[in-house]
Amino acid sequence: KNSIKVPCLMIKNIIFDFDGVLVDSEILVAKAFAKYMNNFGVTVDEKEFASFAGKKTTQVIDILSKKYSITDQQKFFTDIMEIASNIYKKELTTVRGAYDFVSNQKLDLYIGSNSMKDRIIDGLKRVGLSNYFTADQIYSFDMVDKPKPDPDIYLKAIDDNNLIKNQTIIIEDSEVGVMAGVRAGVKVIGITAGGHWHENRDDKELLDAGAFAVTNDYKKIFKLIESI
């Protein structure tokens, strides 16, 4: 009996990133960008966008505008948002294993994301996870001064809820997200179950960013939490 109780005493809170951790949206955004770039006669593999995971859309647009000499960034942003929104509505699913993991969880759950709060709430509803996160358990970049890789989003979640850092873990899927978690002083588990983690992508980038463990299987996260 004691061995079962120990992990509960150690870890009490989980803060999830959203895109690519709970919902399999990073690959959908990549699809939107690939589709849009075709309009310019540029063929881009969706896998090329894997390196942008975790970055804000405006940052990605800035990078691509410079690379492909796209002058009207505002139109680029509006068009991408429209394409992504249409794909998102039709194709959004949970990351493999995320639903079972969340629905069987006894710990306190939070979200800390570089996405907008309204979009997160909408996404949770679409995939049937809205019962597990109230609005005040969701932290987004529009609530803080600086997005990830700065730790502000995670620190706000910790401070607002009086979480103890060594009783908390963060689950992340991107380098910028892992860096934010580490800078917040919390242990980070990397999850590579999302569609943007294709077979040729090395999960070493999450370990190098400071994750204490990386797995492509949510079931293994239960064991990792017990091992802390």
Image (cartoon, rainbow, N blue to C red):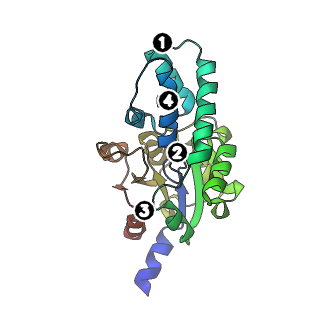
Give the side of residue 95 with respect to residue 80, left or right: left
Q: Check disc 2 and give the amino acid type.
A: Ser
| Residue drawn at point x = 31 percent, y = 42 percent | 201
**Alpha carbons under labels 2 and 1: distance apart:** 27 Å
Question: How many neighbours does mark 4 have within 10 angstroms: few (below 14), some (14-19), or many (20 or more)?
Answer: some
| Residue to which mark 3 is pinned | 218
Q: Is residue 55 visible?
A: no
| Residue to which mark 2 is pinned | 25
| Residue drawn at point x = 66 percent, y = 59 percent | 130
* Residue that extends furthest to the bottom in the rendered view of this protein: 1
Nearer-N-terminus badge (2/1): 2
Q: Is residue 214 above or below residue 10?
A: above
Where, quadrant-wise, is the N terminus in this rendering? bottom left
**Alpha carbons under labels 4 and 2: distance apart:** 15 Å
Q: Nearer the viewer, mark 2 or mark 3?
A: 2
Q: Looking at the picture, how far across and down is residue 185, in whole percent?
A: 47, 50
Nearer-N-terminus badge (1/4): 4
Residue nearest the viewer, comparing 225 with 23 = 23
| Residue drawn at point x = 51 percent, y = 67 percent | 100
Give the side of residue 59 with respect to residue 173, left or right: right
**Alpha carbons under labels 1 and 3: distance apart:** 41 Å
Question: How many neighbours does mark 2 have within 10 angstroms: few (below 14), some (14-19), or many (20 or more)?
Answer: many
Element under disc 4: helix
**Alpha carbons under labels 2 and 3: distance apart:** 17 Å
Q: Examine the image and state in which quarter residue 103 appears.
A: bottom right
| Residue to which mark 1 is pinned | 69
Q: Looking at the picture, how far across and down is residue 104, in whole percent?
A: 53, 72
CB-based contact (under 8 Å), mark 3 and mark 4: no
| Residue drawn at point x = 50 percent, y = 47 percent | 184
Nearer-N-terminus badge (3/4): 4
